[in-house]
Image: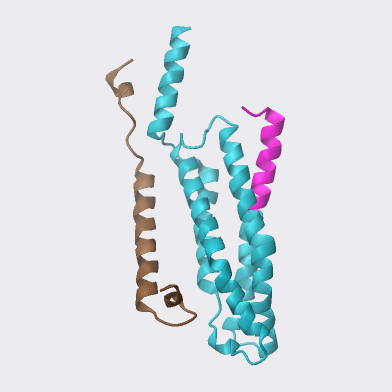
Chain colours: A brown, B cyan
């Protein structure tokens, strides 16, 4: 068994990109809730 | 581990309910068309009144069935639940979509209540396109991951693989 097999694998690039996109989308949704007021728009959650 | 027949049956059920969930979400998007195209008031009211029906009797049951069959399939096959990133991410995204769906149900009921009231101003409601289109976009992530199955072991998956290797080497 070589040294490479003893180390846990690195996180794949696609997982990192997916996480970045998810964070951006969640922050955008939160910003919409805060910035757009109203009874029926995203601001109704606030 | 599931037998090959049980695995196939569960896979067929899982694909049916998860694609059905996306179909129901598409039907929910369609209910927003009369609202957005400025159709006559009767059509708009009817569309709003149908939203809780589609949500309660199609979206929610299909979402729950997707989660349950997905977990059973992962646990009953070589993939495991948290051993491969594509399975773990699919599970996380599906649970997130189900949670948002359930949390959004009271708002859908409110829209229908306004539409059911003859005095209710349906023109001021603005539809419910954001959640339905957003849901379809979010559900496309596990769809793509389940088809492509991109490589990548989680730490847990790596540990399981290492212990399998060491046990097979010792026998």
Examine the structure image and report whether residue A27 is included in the region drawn in magenta. Answer: no
Looking at the image, which is closer to me, B100 or B77? B100
* Residue B139 against residue B116 in the figure, above or below: above
Q: Position of residue B108 (x, y in %)?
A: 59, 72
Magenta residues span: B1-19
* Residue B142 against residue B57 in the figure, above or below: above
* Quadrant in which the N terminus of chain B appears: top right
Residue visible at 65% across and 70% down in the picture: B52
Q: Say whether residue B108 is visible.
A: yes
Examine the structure image and report whether residue B6 is included in the region drawn in magenta. Answer: yes
Q: Is residue A12 left or right of residue B60?
A: left
Q: Is residue B119 left or right of residue A3?
A: right
Residue visible at 57% across and 82% down in the picture: B36
* Residue B158 against residue B144 in the figure, above or below: above
Q: Is residue B126 left or right of residue B3?
A: left
Q: Is residue B168 left or right of residue B123?
A: left
Query: Furthest residue to the bottom?
Result: B119
Residue visible at 63% across and 43% down in the picture: B69
Looking at the image, which is closer to me, B83 or A10? B83
Q: Position of residue B62 (x, y in %)?
A: 65, 55
What secondary structure is the magenta-colored segment mainly? Answer: helix
Residue visible at 66% across and 56% down in the picture: B61
Q: Position of residue B168 (x, y in %)?
A: 47, 12
Q: Position of residue B4 (x, y in %)?
A: 68, 29
């Amino acid at each position: 068994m070589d040294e490479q097999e003893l180390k846990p694998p690195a996180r794949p690039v696609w997982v990192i990109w997916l996480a970045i996109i998810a964070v951006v989308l969640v922050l955008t949704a939160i910003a919409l809730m805060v910035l757009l007021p109203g009874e029926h728009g995203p601001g109704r959650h606030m | 581990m599931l037998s090959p027949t049980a695995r196939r049956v569960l896979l067929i059920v899982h694909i049916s309910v998860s694609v059905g969930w996306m179909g129901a979400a598409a039907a929910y998007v369609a209910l927003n068309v009369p609202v957005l195209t400025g159709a006559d008031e009767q059509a708009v009211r009817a569309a709003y009144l149908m939203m809780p029906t589609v949500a309660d009797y199609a979206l929610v049951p299909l979402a729950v069935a997707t989660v349950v069959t997905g977990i059973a399939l992962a646990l009953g096959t070589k993939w495991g639940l948290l051993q491969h990133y594509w399975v773990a991410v699919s599970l996380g995204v599906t649970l997130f979509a189900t949670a948002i769906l359930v949390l959004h149900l009271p708002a859908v009921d409110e829209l229908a209540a306004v539409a059911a009231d003859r005095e209710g101003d349906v023109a001021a409601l603005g539809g419910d396109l954001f959640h339905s289109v957003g849901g379809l976009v979010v559900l496309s992530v596990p769809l793509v991951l389940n088809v492509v199955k991109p490589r990548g072991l989680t730490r847990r998956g790596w540990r399981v693989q290492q212990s399998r290797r060491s046990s097979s080497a010792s026998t």
